[in-house]
Amino acid sequence: MKQRILRPEHIPLMLLAALFCLSFFFVPGFNQSWLFSTVLKNGSYHGIIALGLLPVLISGDVDLSIGAQMTFYSVLCAVFLKNGYPIPAAVLATLAAAVLVGCIEGAVVARWHFNSILMTIAMSMFLIGLSSALNRGVTIFNLPKQLLAWGDRRLLGVSMPMLFWVLAALVIAFILHQTYWGTFFYAVGHNAQAADKAGVPLLQVKMVAFGLSSLFCAVSSVIYISQLGFAPLSNGQDTTYSVLTIAALGGVSFSGGRGKVTLVLLGGLMIGTLTSLFTLAEVSYYYQNCIKGAILFIAIFTNFSKT
């Protein structure tokens, strides 16, 4: 009789189940029904970005500008709306700007062989400065009520953030497993030189990967301000840390070639659960970062050990 061996893919699911069980029985207030929708909402904003980042990580790169991008797209969309743009036009213009930013990053990384970490740090600094110039250093309040009404809508009882999180997962899963782009991402992540010799268009692959990452970041930003009703000055650092933690918890390889949508979804649920736990337990923001940093280190260390 064959002995069953625990596979690495089972670890995120086991951690999530253990976290829910411990929280349900030992954290006062966690067993209330409304809190589960809060968990899903807390995980959705960063979960959407993590799904968009997945092709970049699979293809062997890292985008550290996602936090700055989220701030920039929030501000950009708010500026469009405050200047009288209809909501659909403002959203489409923001998404178009996101695709442009992502394609520029991908093109520079592929064409001039820039290190993706250094390239995206430079882009992050540029976007932070541009955001400050657009909002003149102040939070943009009083966004149109129609945007808030759209953000509060539910479809079959499912909130907008959760709905778009599910749609994002379906889109990325389709791209990775049903299109040749997905094959290219994995091929480049495993061995970029071999993929290049085999005829894989590296420039287009990098542009598509970074373009998807930026696009999903913009989608999350629009949903975020539709829930808040204003464009915050900065939510960048926390976004970057949380998204990378989600990817690490989901078993995504930071050296490329490995990553699954389902595991990234579980990672997002774990971060959403932790955020809700921190709120209930009134854990200081500073200690939250310490805990998230420790989790990120352990998850990345485990991934490198597997590799």
Image (spheres, rainbow, N blue to C red):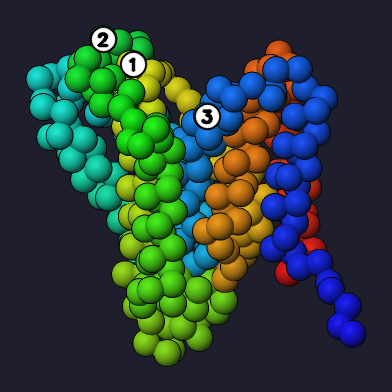
Instruction: Kindly check if marks 2 and 3 are in contact, taking CB atoms under 8 A apart as contact.
Output: no
Q: Which residue is rendered at x = 33% and y = 62% of the image?
A: 207
In terms of secondary structure, where does tag 2 sit? loop
- Is residue 153 visible from the viewing direction of this image? yes
Closer to the chain start, of discs 1 and 3, is 3
Q: Residues within 10 Å of mark 2 (few under 14, many from 20)?
A: few
Judging depth in this view, the residue of 65 and 149 nearest the camera is: 149
Q: Mark 2 points at which residue?
A: 142
Q: Quadrant of the N terminus?
A: bottom right
**157 lies left or right of 256:** left
Name the spot of residue 186 as percent of width and height, x first: 50, 73
Residue type at numbered disc 1 = Phe
Residue type at numbered disc 2 = Asn
Instruction: Kindly check if marks 1 and 2 are in contact, taking CB atoms under 8 A apart as contact.
Output: yes
Which quadrant holds residue 257?
bottom right
Q: Which residue is rendered at x = 84% and y = 74% of the image?
A: 4
Q: Which residue is rendered at x = 75% and y = 29% of the image?
A: 24
Reply above or below: 140 against 213.
above
Which quadrant holds residue 184?
bottom left
In 3D space, how far apart are the residues under numbered discs 2 and 3 (Cα atoms)? 26 Å
Which quadrant holds residue 81?
top left
Q: Name the residue under label 1.
A: 230
**Which dot, 2 or 3, sits closer to the camera?**
3
Q: Residues within 10 Å of mark 3 (few under 14, many from 20)?
A: some
Q: Name the residue under label 3.
A: 37
Judging depth in this view, the residue of 9 and 69 nearest the camera is: 9
Closer to the chain start, of discs 1 and 2, is 2
In 3D space, how far apart are the residues under numbered discs 1 and 3 (Cα atoms)? 22 Å
**Which dot, 1 or 3, sits closer to the camera?**
3
Closer to the chain start, of discs 2 and 3, is 3
